[in-house]
Amino acid sequence: MRVSHKQQGGLAWVTDAVADPAARVAVVASARHHARQIVAGLISVAATGQRPKFYVTRWMLRYPNGAEVRFYFDADEMRGTQHHAAWLAAISGRSRVAEQALLGLRLGRWPRALFTEDACS
């Protein structure tokens, strides 16, 4: 699997976030094929014994420690969701999606977001 530098940074950032068992992380991708690359990347960088399970029908990764990463593709899917962190990967020109993602950052003491322009090349 070919991983861009921006995607490597995002994968490391999410991996760090899911070290907390209570973590709920949103990954907003521009398309499903980008999300599939991110899923594959997150599974490949996880330590042995810490690899997450991918639930295809829910577009969710669940780590053995209980942390979850959910994938979103448009603003309507994100309505009412709550997360500790959000990675917005390649969403240029989609301000409504970014707005919904930021509104959903309500969990934890220091919610945070990472924006990358082109996470999947």
Image (spheres, helix red, strand yellow):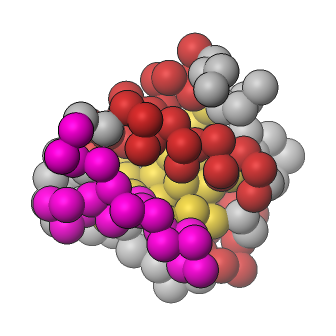
Residue depicted at x 33% and y 55%:
52
Which quadrant would residue 120 be assigned to in this image?
Answer: top right
Looking at the picture, does residue 86 appear above or below residue 73?
Answer: above
Q: Is residue 80 magenta?
A: no
Residue depicted at x 37% and y 32%:
45
Residue 4, how many percent across, how many down? 63, 18
Residue depicted at x 54% and y 78%:
58
Please identify the quadrant where the N terminus is shown: top right
Residue closest to the far bottom? 80
User: Taking 44 as reference, is 68 left or right?
Assistant: left
Which quadrant would residue 73 be assigned to in this image?
Answer: bottom right
User: Taking 32 as reference, is 64 left or right?
Assistant: left
Q: Nearer the viewer, residue 83 or 34?
A: 34
Q: Which stretch appears magenta?
A: 48-69
Residue 44, how many percent across, how many down? 43, 35
Please identify the quadrant where the C terminus is shown: top right
